[in-house]
Image (cartoon, rainbow, N blue to C red):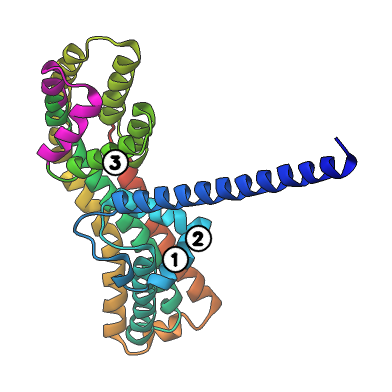
């Protein structure tokens, strides 16, 4: 073989390798795009409108590209609210602005920033409350969930098959969360990873026990039916205990919310008693410091009462 033939053969092999590499990259890119499209379609709720029809879609895309936006998206997903990151951000900004203007006009200019901070704290508290409320509802459905999974496995179904069937039978939030687990399994995720993501979205002791039971039974190939039957009875007892504790602590919870309301009521009474009293009080550094300290003490009292009334069952 001459040198020219060797060069031609090398060039031909190089061109063929480059062509195959381009085809491989195109196939990989197309596969990745199809997977992202499938994940987005499966993660969307059937009742949601088209993504392009949502309000503030451009702002939502920009925010979700940031670390803070992804964290907020995760928190919103845990609450079950039908709101995007962009919509929630705009609503919170509108609330903060409104509270600033109202507090500045009704009380004094000094109370505008304090009201804005109170609005931000209220938005974060609202998300935590919605998440806790969703977790409580999910915990209340856990006995029925364990019973459905036990019936499915007793009928000879695998856990991967019993979970989608249970998702169709149960109401929200358990039905929605099991639907997400079923979608993750359909995308090729392992049962351990899918159930682990569920436990991260809705953290609770009861759910951790259920997930651990399912994962260990699936790994070891043990008797799932007997474990789920025993777990169902335990979850029923814990459900009744949590209900009794919540009833006993309802008055304490009302006291925790009444403490800061007393402080706000006193401010309005002072402003109505004498026109311009709050303006004169907050015009000096001593008055501003007294107001900040008073608000801080009310916040500390609220947190202390909430902490004392928090009993883990």
Say which label, 3 or 2, has the lower sequence index.
Answer: 2
Foreground: 296 or 118? 118
Residue 301 shows in this picture: no
CA–CA distance in space, label 3 to label 2: 23 Å
Q: Majority secondary structure of the magenta segment?
A: helix
Give yes or no for contact between labels 2 and 1 (Cβ–Cβ under 8 Å).
yes
Say which label, 1 or 3, has the lower sequence index.
Answer: 1
Residue on which the image places disc 1: 61
- Local crowd at mark 1 within 10 Å, few (<14), some, or many (≥20)? some
- Residue 78 in the image: state x and y as whole percent: 32, 48
Start-end of magenta stretch: 149-170
From this view, report whether residue 301 is shown above or below residue 189: below
Q: Secondary structure at mark 2?
A: loop
Q: Secondary structure at mark 1?
A: helix
Q: Secondary structure at mark 3?
A: helix
- Residue 286 in the image: state x and y as whole percent: 53, 74
Residue on which the image places disc 3: 183
- Local crowd at mark 2 within 10 Å, few (<14), some, or many (≥20)? few
Residue depicted at x 32% and y 84%: 106
From this view, report whether residue 81 is shown above or below residue 169: below
Residue on which the image places disc 2: 65
From this view, report whether residue 182 is shown above or below residue 11: above
């Amino acid at each position: 073989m001459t040198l020219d033939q060797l060069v031609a053969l090398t060039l031909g092999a190089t061109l063929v390798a480059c062509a195959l590499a381009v085809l491989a990259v195109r196939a990989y890119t197309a596969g990745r795009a199809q997977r992202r499209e499938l994940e987005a379609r499966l993660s969307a709720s059937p009742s949601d409108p088209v993504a392009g029809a949502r309000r503030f879609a451009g702002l939502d895309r920009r925010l979700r590209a940031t670390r803070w936006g992804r964290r907020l998206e995760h928190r919103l997903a845990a609450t079950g609210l039908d709101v995007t990151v962009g919509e929630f951000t705009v609503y919170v900004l509108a609330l903060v602005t409104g509270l600033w203007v109202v507090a500045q006009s009704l009380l004094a200019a000094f109370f505008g920033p304090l009201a804005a901070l109170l609005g931000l704290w209220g938005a974060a508290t609202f998300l935590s409350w919605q998440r806790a409320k969703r977790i409580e509802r999910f915990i209340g459905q856990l006995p029925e969930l364990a019973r459905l999974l036990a019936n499915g496995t007793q009928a000879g179904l695998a856990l991967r098959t019993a979970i989608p069937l249970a998702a169709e039978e149960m109401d929200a939030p358990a039905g929605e969360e099991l639907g997400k687990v079923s979608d993750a399994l359909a995308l090729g995720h392992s049962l351990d990873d899918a159930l682990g993501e569920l436990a991260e979205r809705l953290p609770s002791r009861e759910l951790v026990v259920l997930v651990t039971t399912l994962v260990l039974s699936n790994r070891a190939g043990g008797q799932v039916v007997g474990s789920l039957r025993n777990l169902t009875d335990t979850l029923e007892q814990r459900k009744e205990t949590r209900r009794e504790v919540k009833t006993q602590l309802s008055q304490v919870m009302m006291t925790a919310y009444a403490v800061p309301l007393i402080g706000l009521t006193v401010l309005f009474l002072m402003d109505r008693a004498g026109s311009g009293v709050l303006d004169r009080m907050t015009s000096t550094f001593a008055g501003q410091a007294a107001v900040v300290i008073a608000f801080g003490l009310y916040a500390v009292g609220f947190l202390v009462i909430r902490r004392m009334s928090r009993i883990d069952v």
